[in-house]
Image (cartoon, rainbow, N blue to C red):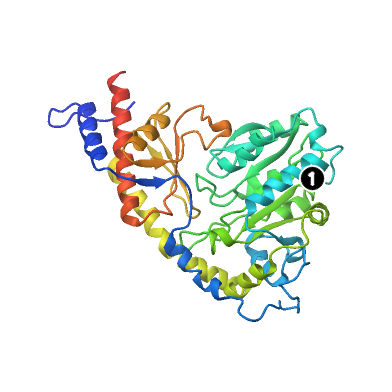
Amino acid sequence: MTSIDVRDGVPPVDRARREYAELAARGLRLDLTRGKPAPDQLDLSAGLLELPGPVYRAADGTDCRNYGGPRGLPELREIFSGPLQVPADRLLAAGNSSLELMHDVVVQALLAGVPGSPRRWAEEERVAFLCPVPGYDRHFAICERYGIEMIPVPMTGAGPDMDAAERLAGADPAVKGIWCVPKYSNPSGETYGDDVVRRLAEMRTAAPDFRIFWDNAYAVHHLTGEPAGLADLLAACAAGADPDRALVFGSTSKVTLAGAGVGFIGGSPANVDWWLDRVSRRTIGPDKVNQLRHALFLRDEAGLHDHMRRQRELLRPKFDAVERILAAELGGTGLASWTTPRGGYFLALEVPEGCAREVVRRAGEAGIVLTPAGATHPYGKDPADRTIRIAPTFPSLPDLEAAIAGLAVCVRLVGAERAATG
């Protein structure tokens, strides 16, 4: 299973156990569980707290202090229209996160169906979603909360396995949707290829109301000066099988202040009208003061990209450190492989089959807390037990370096113990 050799007459398992004992004795308290912005990233948006100042009127004269404006401020929608690939008149600015929007769309579909639904989803005998894996645990949590069956679809390096997706969606009318993080996917970091986007838009589905939940969370979160390209899904759907197939989501949560962001939802005219009708019963309008604050702070799309360049300058050294340490500590051992994302907030570490939970357990006992093994799969169960999500963004660089080096010790220990027991 491994390529570890005996050195200095010390069996690999004994050497690994000694390294682990030294690690545990350090009394570390390090946390890599969630992809949160670090304090220095949040500091880049400190100017938001001084805005909008004494002026509360939007560009069109709207008094942002008052009710109304269910579509959100036009000037903020214009800034994010290009990055999210949604025409501004079909992009809505809403509450503080895209997760609440995705959750509420699922709930409203259950309660009322979506455009094209023959009945409410709650009246269906079964409702199922395709779930690319490894994937985002909070997507899976929404499905699990509401009894939606999750069907795993493998990721390929350029998006989900479309042969599998087409087969499953085409054969089963209970399959109502698919979760997608199309750019710098969580946690693998891959970006969907043009052919994948086209096939998602054009594939035959047994459900007439099939929806693509296009969670473009990392649309502007590049780690290099050469951003990955992503085909326009809404345009592909308009030219394909169903113009209403896609719902696009995004937010400023990892752009400005994570706890005081703005969420976006966009889609076809029919989907937008449906959403506005549904939310009109629960809100008289979004927080336009916060939206004005963001529009004044970012100024325009160029200002958004400049702000994200400064974010990249803080994040790139952390991702580089993870790559450097993993290569130095685990490269050539046969014990691990990992992704090297060009953007986003995560990377995926693959360890030998059957080892991920034990690696995470050993790391936790040594004071390095990781996302639970299995979180990257529906129901928290990775059948191969080999994927570990790494979130490098929040710790300081020295803490991150210590955590990744310690994680490598745990991988070597578990690998050596497995090899020793055959």
Q: What is the x, y in percent for residue 57? A: 71, 78
In the figure, 401 relative to 155: above or below?
below
Q: Quadrant of residue 153?
A: top right
The quarter in which the N terminus is drawn is: top left
Q: What is the x, y in percent for residue 103? A: 68, 46
The answer to whether residue 108 is left or right of residue 360 is right
Taking the view exactly as shown, the residue that stands out farthest to the bottom is 54
The answer to whether residue 280 is left or right of residue 133 is right
Q: What is the x, y in percent for residue 87? A: 73, 63
Q: Is residue 207 visible?
A: no
* Secondary element type, mark 1: loop
- The residue under the point 28% across, 27% down is 416
Q: What is the x, y in percent for residue 94? A: 70, 60
In the figure, 128 relative to 321: above or below?
above
- The residue under the point 35% across, 51% down is 400
Residue bearing mark 1:
241
Q: Nearer the viewer, residue 367 or 119?
A: 367
The answer to whether residue 338 is left or right of residue 89 is left
Taking the view exactly as shown, the residue that stands out farthest to the top is 422
In the figure, 112 relative to 264: above or below?
above
Amino acid type, mark 1: Ala
